[in-house]
Structures are given as structure tokens and as C-alpha cells.
Image (cartoon, rainbow, N blue to C red):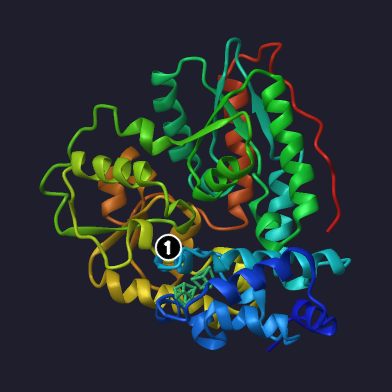
Amino acid sequence: MKTPETSLFCADTKIKGDVYHQAQALHQGCTRCQACVSQCAFLQKNGTPGDIGASLLAGDTAVDPFACSLCNLCTAVCPARIAPESLFLEMRRQVMARNQRPNRRYAPILNYERRGSSRLFSWYHLPTGCDTVFFPGCTLPGTRPETTWSIYQQLKEQIPQLGMVLDCCHKPSHDLGRQDSFLTWFEDMREWLIRHGVRHIIVACPNCYKVFHGYGQGLTVQTAWELLAGDDIEPISSAIARGRITVHDPCPLRNHQDVHQAVRTILARLGLKIREMRHAKKYTICCGEGGSVGLVNPDMAGKWSEIRKMEAGDDLVVTYCAGCVGFLTRAGIKVVHLGDLLVNPAKALAGKAAVAGAPRTYLNRIRLKRRLQKAIKTCPETILPKKIEYNL
Ligand code: SF4
Ligand code: SF4
């Protein structure tokens, strides 16, 4: 079924601007080799990126860009080195630029973003001399406040002046094509951080990584896992670490080998035996949550988790994205978060890590904020930046 967004897109057959240029680049650059099509249910439904580009140029705009998970696997496998995902993101932007309001089925993710960025949930702490902050994102603190707290404490042992920022990176708006809103809100945060001396961001969420990496001019970004891989890590007792594990690399980090390696270093130091799945590292697949496809086209989103379930088999899956853990768990896959494994391996391997679901996640985030406020002696540099309020 077409979404209201698609219908509006179809109403104007004159594609223009970046969509036109992207369509032309795909039409001309794609050799129709099918390498990407064989990997992706969205392309199996719609044809090669070159054919999609040609159709758009011919005035046929029936393809629904909101069914593409923006996972970039097509780009990773493309021998012609073209980037089909860029076209679908541009199409989303064009649709959203025409619409006054997004599809109401996106309300849950946009409400989630709005709350994460509100005064109630956001919090900025910059100690004197701080040039590096931990930015754990929205989902990890909500689902795993204790793990978030422990990771912060471990990072502080390496960086005593480490600051903390609880806020949303606004990736939901970015991926839905709400580019003007995304740029306004993210730039407000980036500019404030730079102005207050921050130069380095440590993240625990792959989506935050992608946003800071792509848009955070003046800021470097690293995952917590890259820093923690260098710590002393106590091996798990062999009585607990039985069986094999496998790793689901989150798709926003497919091009970041240093992160893949750091995660595997941590797992090896914990004493866990890793079996790599067919789709791993650069060639990983989306868990199904990417691009918020599941909210408008759950069948398409489910195709990705079906593949993951088949590849994982009976092995326990370790991943380092709290969103992936949630989506894969709902698909019936045994999965644990790397942070939980680091903080309490016995509980995590026994499937007993404390993981909250909504609406408790919101309460957890407020409690974590209060805990941090109490534990950290407030200094004059701690200023809550002006948050731009916005309506859906
Ligand atoms: S970005 Fe992912 S879902 Fe979209 S076309 Fe490429 S492989 Fe398919
Ligand atoms: S892999 Fe590249 S060249 Fe081959 S069909 Fe896909 S986009 Fe075209």
C-alpha cells in the first residue's frame, strides 16, 4: 500500500534538483549487474537502481523511498561504486519538503526524538577543562541506565575531565527527510559544543556516530568500544562462556573497520569464540529498524531480520546498538548488547541483563539524569543550551 507521502510524491511527475541529478547518475552509472538486487528485498520489488533512476527520469515515480532502510548495503556491494541510497534519501527530502506534516505513522519516532531533545530529558555537563564528552544517545540510557552509568565511569578513568551530554542527535528527522529541521537542531547543538570548548565526542549509538561523523564539523567522533578495547578486560569464566557467539554489526557503521575490530577485540578478551556471519562488517545487513521502515512497511523491514535470524542460527548474537537489540529480539533472535556483556557478562550471557521497555525507558532516562546531577558536582561551565522547541 502506498503511503500518503508516496501519493504526494507521485502527484508531481516533474522530478527536480538533487533527485533529478541522483536519478541521472544512477541511470548512467549502473550497469544493471544485479549484485545489489540479489541482497535487497526493496530492490527486488523495484528493480535495479539504474532502472529506478530511468523510471524517475521518464516521469514514473511509483517507487516508495520510505520502504528503503537507507542501510547502504547496495553501495557496499556495487562494483560500479555508485550510491543508490542517496537517491532514496533525496526523494524522502523532496516529499517532506512538500508536505506540511509527516505521516502520522511516524508520530512515535518523532515524539521519541522530541522528548529526547526536550529540557526534561536533555542535560549537558562540561567540567572545567573538558574537551571530550560522552554522548550515549537516547535508547541506551532508556533501556540500560545502569550500563550507561558504568560505561561513563569506565571512560572517566581514561579521561578524568570527561563531560556528559544527554540529548538526541536528531537522526530520526534526518532519515525521514526532514532536512531543514535536522540541520537547525543539530547545528544548534554542534555550535554550542564547539563554543564551549568541546572537540571530541564519544558515542555508544551507531546512529549518533553517523550523524556526528557526517555533520559534526570541528568535532571528532569515536565509539566507547574503541576506547574500552584498550582497558584491562577480565576474561569470563569458562563455565559461563560456553558456546559460540556471532556479531551483528549495525549498518550505520559498515564503513568503520576500526570499530568492527575494537568490538571483536573486546569479545576475544572476554574469552568468547566468534563465528562471523555471511553478512558482517562492511557487508552487514540492517536489523530492520533502519529508516523507520517498520513503521510504514513492516513486511519490508521484516525481510532483513529474517535473513539475520537464518544466519545467526543457534548462536547468541552480540551487537552494539540498543535499537538493533530491540528489533532483533522482537524477531525472535537471541541477542545481547555489548555494553551489558562488558558490565555484567554472567547476567548478559544468561539472558538476564536488566533491559527496560517503553514507557519505563522514559522514567529511566529522567532517573539517570537525576543520578548524574547528584553525583557530579555542578560547576559554572555546566549550562543547559537553549533548546529549540518544535511541533510535529
Ligand atoms: S540502502 Fe539498503 S534497503 Fe535501500 S536500496 Fe540499498 S540495500 Fe536496499
Ligand atoms: S550493484 Fe551497482 S551496478 Fe550493479 S545493479 Fe546495483 S547499483 Fe547497478
The C terminus - image quarter: bottom right
Please, what is the three-letter code of the amino acid marked with disc 1?
A: Ala
| Element on which disc 1 rests | helix
Q: Nearer the viewer, residue 357 or 77?
A: 77
- Which residue is at the far right? 100
Q: Is residue 221 above or below residue 79?
A: above
> Image quadrant of residue 102?
bottom right
Q: Which residue is mark 1?
A: 76
Work out whether residue 361 or residue 213 is closer to the camera in this orientation and state it: 213
Q: Quadrant of the N terminus?
A: bottom right
Identify the residue at horizontal 43%, vertical 59% (top origin). Answer: 325
Q: Which residue is outermost to the left? A: 238
Q: Residue at x 73, y 63 (%)?
A: 18
- Residue 188 position, x and y percent, is 77, 35
Q: Position of residue 315 (x, y in %)?
A: 23, 65
Above or below, comparing residue 239 to residue 107 in the picture: above
